[in-house]
Image: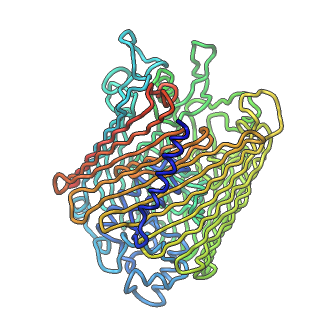
Amino acid sequence: MQIQFNYFFAIFFCALFFFQKADAQYIDSLQENILIENVATNTDAEVKFDVEQTQLLFYKKHPLNLNTATEKDLQDLGLLTDLQIQNLIRYKKENGKLLSVYELQSLNTFDIETIRRIFPFVTVEGNLNDYHISVKELFSQGRFQFTHRINTTLETPIGYSVPDSVHLPSNKYYEGTKIRFYNRFLYSYGSKLSYGITTEKDAGEAFFKGTEKQGFDFYSVHFYLKTNLRIETIVLGDYEMRLGQGLAMYTGFGFTKTALVTAIKKEFPTLMPYRSTNEFNFLRGAAITYRISKNQRLTPFVSYRKLDGNLLQNDSTIQSDNGISTLQTSGYHRTLSEIQDKNTQSIFLTGAHYQFEKHNIKIGASGIHGEFGLPIQKLDKPYNLYDFTGKQWNVMSADYSFVFRNLNFFGEGAFNDLKKYATVHGLIASLNAKLDAVFLYRNYQPGYFSLYSLGFGENTAPANENGFYSGFIAHSFSKISISAYADYFQFPWLKFTTDAPSHGFDYLAQLTFQPDKNTSIYLRYQYKSKQTNESPVVDVLLPLWNENTQHIRFNAAYKATDAISLCNRLEWIQYQLGNNKVENGFLIFQDMVYNPSRKLYDIGFRLALFNTDSYNTRVYAIEHDVPGSFTVPALYGKGAHCYVMLRYKFFRKIDTWLRVGETVYPFQTNNGSGLDQINSNHKTDVRVQVRWEF
């Protein structure tokens, strides 16, 4: 059986490369998917890109005029850095209006990849965003959109095989059905106006019965308005707030290290409407941005909402309202324990952000007060010594960004009422037309805490870490670029599964070849080493072991004909803990998208083979999915994975998608784990989405 599988693996590999064509052309949609994958493999993609798609879809129909766009307009586009924005503004002052988007190539900070990325969303001619519009037009000339999505698994996991004798929630079964429902009604006018409602029921959650008689488990409503008045921005309901470099607050989606080597600076608007389904990472209340003067703005905010958390227990059967041991962020309410954790905690947040901005200088200051309904009480473990406990906290921070010629200095420093601090400082340098370099230093003390914080680094929260990151992108030839980074980090105090201060490093290098504007091929190597316990279950102190992981990826994306786009990938992963056995993982796939021009349909397809020794060598690969949803499965074991996605436009304003994906494990009798275990060697996922625009 093993020999047959490896033989099939080799045949597929040969067929894959035989299918390539030397004159293939690359398309924008595949380039966007590569960009998304760099970020999505490290975080929750759906949280961020669900928002970005909505705004970029408007810009695709109504491109932003680069000749009339203000600095704020360029920032709201979300595709340019501060260094690029300042250089573009300076160029227009010195040379007048742009005659073509490709004139941007004359600016050192705009390489051909950046121009291709923004090309679908910008123009140098007039459009709707160039004119002052009335309130009536703002509320009547925008775009209504209704989206309905259904997900399910054709096989039945054991968590849904509920005996007839069970009538109450249990930890042995899911309370609801295996169907996930998602609905969103949205009205938007570019980045100026947005209001809508989002509802969701996860698979396994009750629906209009049992513990969820109000229907959906999650409801989200927002209203967002930008004006030309003193009150520039108003947001009510659910919203995102991003301050500085994320040390004090950064809700919504964020990223740290990715293969986008120079993307180390967080550059997003302070306030954004929340339009995703992550049930933890957002604020609920109200906020405004008030223009004090031409160069000064103040953004006060207030938020109150319920959170999920584990209530402390006095004994095995009686729950106590004395405190919460941990917050739950999954948003699932399917089993008895998950239902009992729902809305057990509350969080009140208030504060303000001040920003001074003039030409190439930005200076900000923030103050935040937070208060839990019940105190946080951690388990008495050494690694929890510096973790936050109690009900209240206060955070103050200051951030800056300064552009001098082709250099962008930026950073933020924050401290809490326990006198613990976090600080990060970086430099983005465009040394010449062919070389960009970045440097970043961070120092996050053990004991620093702010609930919705996200700093650059190895950890998810900016605490108990210091390190130095450097990277570069070199365009040595017109068709070849080389990028690389090196990151060295230390953890001054203990971590979960790491019973001593530890350290590590992370290296990445990538060679990219773009023979023409429609073809992209890259080879990537990554090596990461960090320290951890020999075994997470051993309750005695032992020397730390090095945990080493290596990745090699070859990826080619191109267009075979006017209608057929292809993408090939080969990936290898190696993992070793200390002197233990070396573990390996392999993935190979072929993508095909058939998108004939002026047709009512398009089709996407993938066939992938994977062979990994364990979960440690799992492989991630983003997949084409319905708009607003991104699938990045972790493939491990031995098997094959494929999916087919069809889009069809039944009417002029109604699009429908059908996506069917199946994973087969030929050498297993079951797959999955826990209540999601399926007593079969395959798993089939089905997703249907309907979108009506009017």
Quarter of the view holding residue 527: bottom right
Residue drawn at 57 percent across, 51 percent down: 249
Residue that protrudes farthest toward the bottom in the picture = 95
Residue that protrudes farthest toward the top in the picture = 165
Quarter of the view holding residue 378: top right
Residue drawn at 47 percent across, 20 percent down: 336
Q: Where's residue 439, x and y in %?
A: 68, 67
Residue 334 shows in this picture: no
For the C terminus, the image quarter is bottom left
Quarter of the view holding residue 265: bottom right
> Foreground: 237 or 462?
462
How many numbered discs sit on the rendered protein?
Answer: 0
Residue 104 shows in this picture: yes
Q: Where's residue 545, x and y in %?
A: 78, 41
Residue drawn at 32 percent across, 71 percent down: 129
Q: Where's residue 185, x and y in %?
A: 28, 47
**Apparent side of residue 578 relative to residue 80 in the rendered image (left or right):** right
Q: Where's residue 415, x and y in %?
A: 69, 51
The relative height of residue 118 versus residue 266 in the rendered view (above or below) is below
